[in-house]
Image (cartoon, rainbow, N blue to C red):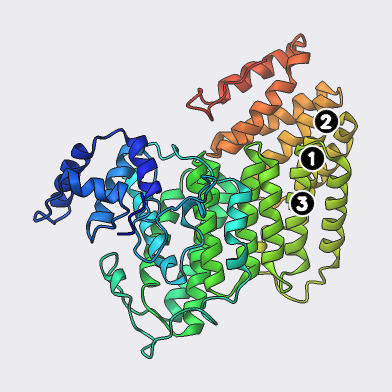
Amino acid sequence: MNGQPNTRLCDLFGLAGWSKGELARLVNRQAAAMGHPQLATDTSRVRRWIDMGEIPRDPVPRVLAVLFTERLGRVVTTEDLGLVRHGRAGKRRGDGSVEHPDGVPWAPERTAAVLTEFTGMDLMLNRRGLVGAGAALAAGSALSSAMHDWLHTDPALKADAPRIEDPLHVDPAGLDRYEAAPIGSQEIEELERSVEVFRAWDAARGGGLQRKAVVGQLNEVGGMLAYRHPDHLQRRLWGVAANLAVLAGWMSHDVGLEPTAQKYFVIAAHAAREGGDRPRAGEALSRAARQMVHLGKPDDALDLMKLAKSGAGEEALPRTRAMLYTIDAWAHASMGRGQAMRRALGLAEDLFVSDKGDVPPPSWMQMFDEADLHGMQALAYRTLADHEASAASAAQRHAKEAIELRAANRDRSQIFDYISLASACFIADDPEQADRYARLALVSMRANSSHRTWDRLREMYRLTAQYAGYPKIQDLREEIKFALPKAKGTRGRTARA
């Protein structure tokens, strides 16, 4: 007990709307359901947790995490509640701001525990049919300032991880989460192959159908990380965790679970750093930046991109750095900064062509090929065209290049290309061509579960308004309205205009 209020628990308690006595009764009931019938919590004890910063013993933190997760309809972990003994309990600075949002960076030995707990809660939400989207995103500047020093230190395996004589030592905390056992290189190879399967499925069909499978696999890997394997195996296992966490985040973003997605991107950055792979950590943070641009927060995206580029380190390949600059360009385009956007795209092009290919790209960069470069350029120019109509011609050129180069199994990216091209054609006053490419996008979307494609389609729908008097465009507008899901919450904007 530190005598100070646990502000994280206090804030979530206020959102939940319980009384202290009601929460005490719920804790006792839930604990009994989880196999701890001896627990006897009362109102005064709940008051000490909230007002005095007392951290209860196990299993109470886990019980509280389950209760708040169910109540709020989103993942709530013991970290979120400020109930980890060696971490901060959400203390505020004098100005009232939270010192480290969402408890990042957490201690190195906590990464596997946070990963396992978060995925477990996420799976519980899915099983019980809860929404899972009711939290607020942490600002890019807050995340980047919290993680900067941590990301630039040596990886945990080389420097700050506790060294244990027995390489197969298991963290006792992990025993309650997973029946821990050592694994070998063959099992890790199988896990690495599973990542490729999930990644290919996501690229083809969107994140909706396989998200739970990826989260479940990540949960299993978190349990495996409870063991301290030999360093070469442990690094590979952390790499699997980072790749799965990025996929879980990207799939969550794809279906509109934005706070959940952000947490997975942060978990991925932690896992990559634990495995000594700074470029992977930087790429994970760049995903969070792309998410911010999509949600209309380009300033936050640029804050995250500064950290992503510096955190990736000198070992990042030219093609990786090229990809990072395309995200910078999209953020600048969203703010109407044409000169900054063109400068970033120029750097991306130069870096891309400078990659001699003598060093094989990591598996997570193999999706960023020439088609993706043109696709991101098309997206940036199309976004800038909202501010500078003349940028539409460049958007059309790059979108056509991307479509020509796209691999057959990159269906979702091709949909984005078609939407970028159709939108640019509308802006360039070419409704005939716009109609053609818009219909190609609609046909392709039938087998896709990506909410992001619907968001981009809504943006295109807005551009059709000035051509509503054209019979073909009026028909197109009706088809778009039919294809879009009905409004749901703040994300479900109906097609209008």
Decide: is 481 above or below 148: above
- Determine which of the numbered discs, if any, sits on residue 234 in the image: none
- Seen at 83% across and 32% down, the residue is 385
Q: Are marks 1 and 2 in contact (CB under 8 Å)?
A: yes
Left or right: residue 175 compared with residue 482:
left
Check the picture and name the quadrant holding the C terminus. Answer: top right
Left or right: residue 16 compared with residue 29:
right
Residue type beneath disc 1:
Ala
- Determine which of the numbered discs, if any, sits on residue 333 in the image: 1
Sequence order check, earlier mark of 1 and 2: 1
- Seen at 41% across and 40% down, the residue is 132
Q: Nearer the viewer, residue 420 or 190?
A: 420
Q: Is residue 248 visible?
A: no
- Determine which of the numbered discs, if any, sits on residue 326 in the image: 3
Residue type beneath disc 3:
Thr
- Seen at 33% across and 55% down, the residue is 3
Q: Element type at marker 1?
A: helix
Residue 417 place in picture, x, y as percent: 73, 40
| Residue occupying the far top of the picture | 469
Q: Are marks 1 and 3 in contact (CB under 8 Å)?
A: no
Marks 2 and 3, how far apart in space? 18 Å
Occupied quadrant, residue 380 = top right
- Seen at 50% across and 22% down, the residue is 486
Pair 1/3: label in front: 1
Residue at label 2?
387
